Image (cartoon, rainbow, N blue to C red):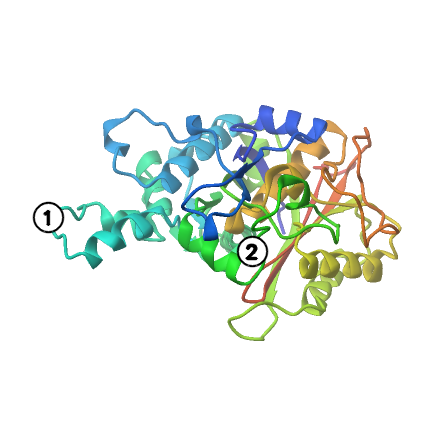
Amino acid sequence: MNKIVITGYGIAVPGSHNGKQFEKQLRKGIHGIKSFNDEHLPQNKTLSLGYLDPIVFDREEKSYKKYPRVSKVQINTTDEAIKMSGIDLSKKKTGVFIGTSLGGTEGYEANIPISNKGDYKSFPNSAIGETNFQSTAAAINGHLKLTGIAKTIATGCTASMEALETACIYIKSGIIDTAIVGGVDIANTPGLLYAFSKIRSLPLGHELEQSGLPFSKNSKGFVAAEGSASLVIEREEDAVKRGGVILAEIDDVQSNNDGLGVFGSDPTGKHMLKLSKEIVANKNPDYVNSQALGLRPSDELEANNHRLLFDNQIPITSIKGMVGHAFGASGLIQVIASLIGMQGNFIPYTARTDYVGHETLNIMDRFQERKVSEVLITCHGYGGNNSVAYIKKHSVKGD
């Protein structure tokens, strides 16, 4: 089977609005998280959140004026990925696969009060586009003048990883040649913040020093963040033939579900562990890029699985202390962080942690130059979906 490779990426996270900025952020451990206190937050309490720089979605074209912000953000990161790849999509059968957990909640929250008041005259004619999960995939196809597959994967916090999984299946089947894979969520609106605060997942009423600390029992909850990530993936032989620069190989990506219903996920992590064992098999990753996000059950799951799978012999890390948790976009953001570290010979380290409760875990907690050839990436979410990916430095026959 021909390899599937990554030839371009684009990224926007709190603290960075392109790949070069993100690499600097990863090297220096800079965070883009801020504390807020205003009337829109639950009980008017302090809450730490991650927002994107306005430059990420400030498009001037008239045709995009009514596009939801979630779609404009994804267009920008997709443009960055395509430019890096150098690919001519007009000569390819291209599929677009977008992963999102919430589809961008701004449209819902802005328009529902208008309809509840019965104010038909003020209700915007753009409302359907603002609230349709498929809008972003459609926006990418329209932006790039593509008429092939456009699919939205909405499986919670694993959505972008499962978009990657789906795209790989389509390429392997021969239905498409290449794929634009994206992940995006713009969801820091009152309804979502109320919902996660109600189940005590957000650090409501706590300062930044106790918010979103990976692998720390002192963390009072995760930092909800905006984010967007995009990849260009294609068959190895096609990338080589057109002279494209291959950034990494996608060795495998798989998903499953805990089977426990709507609320929460399996705290034992046994189903994610099963996936990890299947994907790793006899391979030797240089480290694990985990989803640890400063939420105790999630972090303990990641730590326990790491010990069971690797006997704590290799490092584990999390970038969530820098960028927060961007829901459905988070998995692909982790992939790109791993890709950047692989290219730059370093492991993106775990910033903003004090290790409390995880003192014996092999956490990469400071910048170190280190050759990285293979990475395991883990992701799981509310509702029980798990997704695991394995990426490798590209090698050609005879290497």
Q: Residue furthest bottom?
A: 260
Instruction: Look at the image and tell me whether residue 236 can be seen.
Output: no
Q: Is residue 379 above or below residue 32?
A: below
Residue at figure coordinates x 56%, y 55% from the top left: 158
What residue would you read off at disc 2?
158
32 and 209: which one is in front? 209
Q: Nearer the viewer, mark 1 or mark 2?
A: 1
How many residues crowd mark 2 within 10 Å: few (<14), some (14–19), many (20+)? many
> Is 348 on the left or on the right of 245, as rendered?
right
Of the numbered discs 1 and 2, the one sitting upstream in the chain is 1
- On the image, the x and y values in percent for residue 300 come to 74, 59
Rendered-image quadrant of the C terminus: top right
Q: Position of residue 357 (x, y in %)?
A: 81, 54
> Which residue is farthest left?
121
Q: Is residue 108 above or below residue 55?
A: below
In the structure shown, which secondary structural element does the residue marked by tag 2 occupy? helix
* Other-residue count near label 1 (Cα within 10 Å), few / some / many at <14 / 14–19 / ≥20: few
Residue on which the image places disc 1: 121
Whole-number angstrom distance, CA of label 1 to CA of label 2: 39 Å
Evaluate whether residue 261 shows in this view.
yes
Q: Are marks 1 and 2 in contact (CB under 8 Å)?
A: no
